[in-house]
Amino acid sequence: MFRTLTLPVAALLLAACTEPEKYVERPVDQLYNEGMAQLQREFYRDAAKAFEEVERQHPYSVWATKAQVMAAYSLYQGNRYDDAVVALDRFIALHPSNPDIAYAYYLKALCYYEQISDVERDQRLTDLALATLKEIIARFPDSRFARDAKVKIDLTVDHLAGKEMEIGRYYLKRGNYLAAVNRFKAVVDKHQTTTHVPEALHRMSEAYTAMGLTDEARRVAAVLGHNFPGNDWYMDAYEMIEEKQVRPRKAERPWYGVWMNPDAPPEKTQARPKQAEKPWYKIW
């Protein structure tokens, strides 16, 4: 009896929960202002819905096109990057000559740029960010978005070079020298303006030395010395190849730090593990 009575009640409750919202037509200015108010309150999901409703209810109004951009911006602010990119691609396709088109490309680039992950992970989004940033410069070279895009391109390229270095070091450490050389060579050839080039040349020289290709190692070291004279990576490469010490060795500090009493006997000192250093090539 109990089960028979509860089933209709449950069905009614389920129907009430799944009942679609009633369509209520509202003035365009009211919908748009509601979206702006929700955006200021940082209720980004509600803001996106309000702006989308502007286009749905008033597709031919002057506010509908602006609402498309604002809906994408609300999605971006709410970290819904994939949805924002879809909305921006639609806006770009429908309104290629709109005054806000440069901003649409820039916002799309930010959606990719802010998702760039650690160099140890896949860099597909980094490639997409780089391609979109370059498109901004090509299409809108005189815009303020192009200036910022150039800065972000430098950081993005440096990040891609860092990824290549990470893989190259992995191969080098495991004795896969030819694969390591190919990765370091890619950094030198494709990312010549990044901060990773001196280390890449040094690592190439190191790999050639390990393979017994001393002449090739010297040639790479000479390129390193010519372009980065006095650089620590060049000095290390020269010492490695020539097996000579050309500069005094710095006294190595122990991995632990004593902070209680530096004059205390060794058995009374306190130590703590060394903290892992963050890679210097990360950009955020």
Image (cartoon, grey):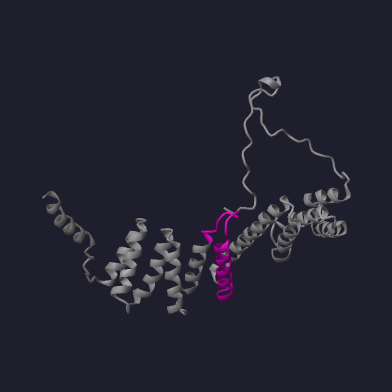
The residue drawn where x is 16% and y is 55% is 7
Where 221 sits versus 133, above or below?
above
Q: Is residue 72 left or right of residue 282?
A: left
Q: Nearer the viewer, residue 6 or 23?
A: 6
Q: Where is residue 194 shown, x and y percent of the image?
A: 69, 60
Q: Is residue 232 above or below residue 114?
A: above
Location of residue 253 (image quadrant): top right
Residue 137 coordinates in the image, percent (x, y): 58, 72
| Residue 212 shown left or right of residue 171 in the figure | right
Toward which corner of the image does residue 176 lie, by quadrant? Answer: bottom right
Left or right side of 235 for 18 = left
Q: Residue at x 66, y 31 (%)?
A: 257
The magenta span reads 113-142
Q: Nearer the viewer, residue 205 or 74?
A: 205
Q: Would residue 133 be counted in the magenta stretch?
A: yes
Most distant residue in the front direction: 1
Residue positioned 78% across, 49% down in the render: 232
Task: List x then y, in percent, for residue 20.
Answer: 23, 65
- State whether residue 139 is above or below residue 253: below
Q: Position of residue 73 (x, y in %)?
A: 42, 64
Image mark count: 0
State yes or no: residue 129 in magenta: yes
